[in-house]
Image: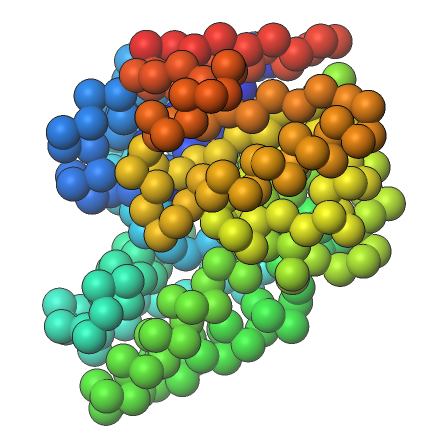
Amino acid sequence: MKLNCVNVGYGDAFLFQSDNVNMLIDTGSGLESEYEGYEERINIVKFLEKEKISHIDELILTHIHEDHVGNLDSIIKSFSISRVWIPKDFEKVKKIEFIEDKEFNKNSSKLFSRALNEFAQALDFFRKNNIKVETLCVGDKRNIAGIDVSVLGASPDITDKFLQYYKSLYECKNFEQAQALVDQMDAMSNHTSLLLKLEYKSFKGLFCADNIPANWSEGIKECIKDINFIKIPHHGQLDAVDERFMRVMPIEFCITTASSERRYNSANPQIYELLKKWAKEDGRDIKVLFTDPSREYEYLKEVEYGNGSIEFEIDEAMAYRYKK
């Protein structure tokens, strides 16, 4: 089994490959500006083509934000897909014509509204082309692409509230009210992220998307006591770690998907100082890796620059290499 943590800049795209089975978690951004002027970053479509992949067996979409599903339209136009996994009840999302091409006060809200409608259009495409769409919610256990997947989040209360906002937005006819609802949904969307534990042989990975520890239930501690790989939530911003949970996990590798310019104060140095401090106190080693590292982190021996992905061999032991 191989795992490629693809350098899509500020965003998530993870490719698992085993026995000609391909599973993709999120699609990264679809904005040209995310890649222009950054030779090391690569659009996920170009990366998959470079890997000579023409078919995606399993596609997992963690939540609706441009940096996670912004390239969805290009993915469905470029590759055949067998099955798609989305958060529970998100299959109800339909395109909202009323907000199309509107000028929002916040750029983030504009990007969110676009991602929301593109997500809805993709669902419509899947239905019309008989592509199976399945949902995931807390407590679910599935075997996807030969990987045991346990769903630890998001909280159903948060997801339900998000979808209530969506329903109000769908029925809304006043743009000022619609704009306020989009702002609220944009702010809440991170918290609806699927929190996934993936297990394959020695690999015990926690893929958090943007689901931060403040939203995690105390009950998940028993589920994460063997985690040796973590995708740091929320791109390594200050709310990404919490000692209550991080000290429970025997983390060997942590991956951060922040951009090299450290947008929104992501890849915050305090995060890695804490992770290394806790690891040292617990008598273990930890490797801190970045898909799109900043030059500010030259003091970390593990960091290399100009890579299109970090590729892991995950079997009885884990090894990684940087891929140009």
Determine the residue positioned at 46% across, 63% down: 189
What is the quadrant of the C terminus in the image? top left
- Left of 280 or right of it: where is 28? left
- Left of 137 or right of it: where is 133? left
Above or below, 298 relative to 174: above
Above or below, 110 relative to 284: below
Determine the residue positioned at 74% across, 9% down: 316
Determine the residue positioned at 64% across, 40% down: 274
Above or below, 267 relative to 176: above
Determine the residue positioned at 20% across, 27% down: 38
Where is residue 28? Give x, y as percent. 35, 39
Rendering quarter of residue 97? bottom left
What is the quadrant of the N terminus in the image? top right
Where is residue 285? Give x, y as percent. 71, 20
Q: Is residue 322 visible?
A: yes
Rendering quarter of residue 103? bottom left
Where is residue 134? Give x, y as percent. 56, 48
- Left of 215 or right of it: where is 265? left
Where is residue 268? Give x, y as percent. 47, 43
